[in-house]
Amino acid sequence: MQPQPVNFLKSLSDRRLLVAFLIGISSGFPWVLHGSVLTLWMQAEGLSRSAIGYIGIVTTIYAFNWIWAPLIDQFRIPLLHRLFGQHRSWILFCQALLIAFMWLISGTDPVDNLLLVGLYALGISSVSATQDVAIDAYRVKLFSREEMDEKIPWASALAGAGWQTGFTFLGGTLALLLGGETFGFSWPEVYRLLIGFMLALMLIVALSPSTREDPQRQSAEPSGRAGGMPGRPARWLHATVVVPFAEFFQRCGLQLAAGILLFLFSFRLGEAMLGRMSLVFYVELGFSNDEIALYRNLLGGGATIVFSLIGAFINTRFGIIRGMLVGGIAMASSNLLYAVMAQTGPEPWLFVLTLIVDNFTTAFATVCAISFISYFASRTYTGTQFALMTSISNFGRTTLAAGSGAIVDGLGGNWALFFVMTALMVIPALLILLWMSRMLENHKTGEGASA
């Protein structure tokens, strides 16, 4: 997987790359709803660090969206499919459901009914995980196989930048400012106000370009009527679930395929542990909601967009495998700055420096990971295989990260030691990458992408 250098401005002039960025916003924004806003709401109501961490278990659903991913590749939503095509119709359908869950959670109190709040948060994460399958497939299908080496690193960079824009730069900043000291809205009111932001995202998706149907995809589909489950259930299940997964293992080989999935599982675990508790840490350290919105969301999110483009340039110049190795080391090292913050206290200059370094390394690693997955996803079973690999990655980042609050409590609130632990968590992934490196350099997928 060794993309050739491309002209920066020429690459970014492709309108499809702007689309990759904009739909990336739709992918990142729901994490504000079951992440930042819910975390600060629970903390404001006096719930414990462990409870805040455990509520994050709802994000485990992202690790299992591969189970229903074949439906997104196959099932046609009546009327919406005719207007917007296969994957955009699913994105719009999911966004409408997100609005419904935002309204429901805004009418619930986490102190009196934490279980119901958790169920609504699970609904948000489930719909968001489904939307991610459609977004990933739509982005990949915007480009032909011949354009993969040139365009995918840039599309991955802009998708990652869009995700960060939705989560921190726009959605997160807006949410924290609305619920912060300046505007002073209650957190339930913040949920209701953010519905307007979701409606704007729906308009962006509706105006995005359609993609060409892949002829190979059409020939591989079982015959049947649009919107239904074609043929006998067993035959449909085999064609839409068994075949896509079997194709991935056959094309890559059992050893390489297993290595890829194991690497993706462990690569960003330490980052996820840190990210889950970062807001709690900032507040406990003494920063206000407005300061967090300014430093973490506005400055940090803006820096991430620039750093994502830099990461794409480095990847196209030096190759994704070496980029992932360097990115993993840098990402883990940046966690040590949080340990310094824990010892120093609420110093704004150190907060900004830590965020700049952290956003650079995280953006770099994200671009590498998305590009890595894109190259190993089949053009025929794009949504299903992309979901499989991202789900494996998300399982480590979501399910295990839910215990991060309990770890901090178990350490007696020793944040510095916690951050050192998160830095060490990347070591197994880097060892796996080194083990795979020779196979990845020599391996060529059945569809022309190489490592």
Image (cartoon, grey):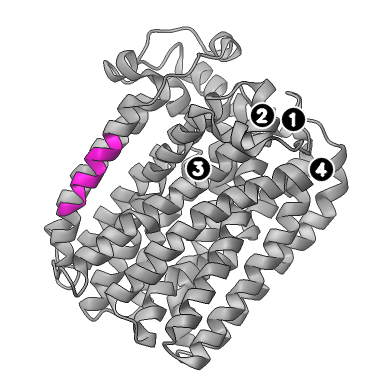
Outermost residue, front side:
9
Q: Residue at x 53, y 28 (%)?
A: 14
Q: Residue at x 58, y 13 (%)?
A: 220
Q: In this view, does 88 lie to the left or right of 356?
A: left
Q: Can see residue 231? A: yes
Pointer 3: what residue? 159
SS state under label 2: helix
Say the numbered circle drawn on residue 106.
Answer: none
User: Which amino acid lies under the numbered mark 4 shown in the image of this protein?
Assistant: Leu
Q: Which of marks 2 and 1 is nearer the N terminus?
A: 2
User: Which amino acid lies under the numbered mark 1 shown in the image of this protein?
Assistant: Ala
Pointer 4: what residue? 440
Most prominent secondary structure in the magenta stretch? helix
Write down the quadrant of residue 71 in the picture: top left
Q: Which portion, as a residue range, is magenta?
A: 193-202
Q: Earlier in the sequence, mark 3 or mark 4?
A: 3
Residue 172 in the image: above or below residue 80: below
Q: Which of marks 1 and 4 is nearer the N terminus?
A: 4
Say the numbered circle drawn on residue 148.
Answer: 2
Q: Position of residue 353 (x, y in %)?
A: 53, 75
Say the numbered circle drawn on residue 449.
Answer: 1
Task: Work out how far the residue at label 4 is from the one at label 2, CA to CA, in angstroms.
Answer: 17 Å
User: Which amino acid lies under the numbered mark 2 shown in the image of this protein?
Assistant: Met
Q: How crowded is mark 1: few (under 14 residues within 10 Å), some or many (20 or more)?
A: many
SS state under label 1: loop
Q: Do the residues labelled 3 and 4 touch (CB within 8 Å)?
A: no
Q: Where is residue 193 in the image (x, y as percent from the top left)?
A: 16, 53
